[in-house]
Amino acid sequence: MAHRDDSVETIQQELTAFARRARATAARIHPELSLVSYTLLAHLDDQQGCRATDLAAHYLLDKSTVSRQIAALEKLGFVERRLDPADHRVQVLHPTAEGAQVLDNASNSRRQAFHERLADWSAADLNRFALYLLRYNAAQKRLG
């Protein structure tokens, strides 16, 4: 049993280190775009817009956290609000052209960094790692 506990401890430590490096990398790629802001902007782009409440629910974030992040993205000119054509009482958040360009640049930089970090991994190792991450994230979604 100690072996399993040791493995879980190592996973926890390494995921924590990964998250810290991801935040630092995000800050280097675009100093004003935090990892949370990048994630929210990417989601808006992927979904072709959504409401702030949908962002909060999807990422299990407090509405006030999402509100602050969206306000910062709006101030930078990366996000705009549009009325929902189906319900004019609802505002839908969308990336601006500038926001989409910043997101594209950041995504390219992040992808390049992953390619560099994983350059000496075999295709089989990459495939296993990808499957493990998918499995881990699926379990996290299922368990909440």
Image (cartoon, rainbow, N blue to C red):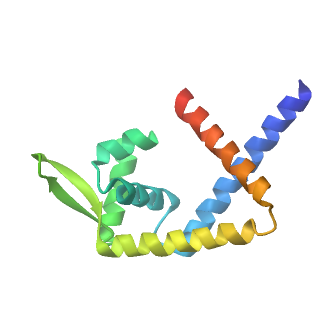
Look at the picture and state if 112 lies above or below 53: below
The residue sitting at 63% across, 73% down in the picture is 112
Q: Quadrant of residue 82?
A: bottom left
Horizontal and vertical percent position of residue 29: 55, 74
Q: Which residue is at the far front?
A: 124
Look at the picture and state if 28 lies above or below 86: below
Is residue 69 left or right of 52 when viewed as pictured? Answer: right
Horizontal and vertical percent position of residue 136: 65, 39
Look at the picture and state if 125 lies above or below 135: below
Horizontal and vertical percent position of residue 122: 80, 61
The residue sitting at 67% across, 50% down in the picture is 130
The residue sitting at 40% across, 60% down in the picture is 41
| Residue 144 in view here | no
Q: Quadrant of the N terminus?
A: top right
Is residue 124 left or right of 44 when viewed as pictured? Answer: right
Horizontal and vertical percent position of residue 58: 41, 41
Which residue is at the front of the view, 90 or 131? Answer: 131
| Residue 105 in view here | yes
Is residue 92 left or right of 4 when viewed as pictured? Answer: left
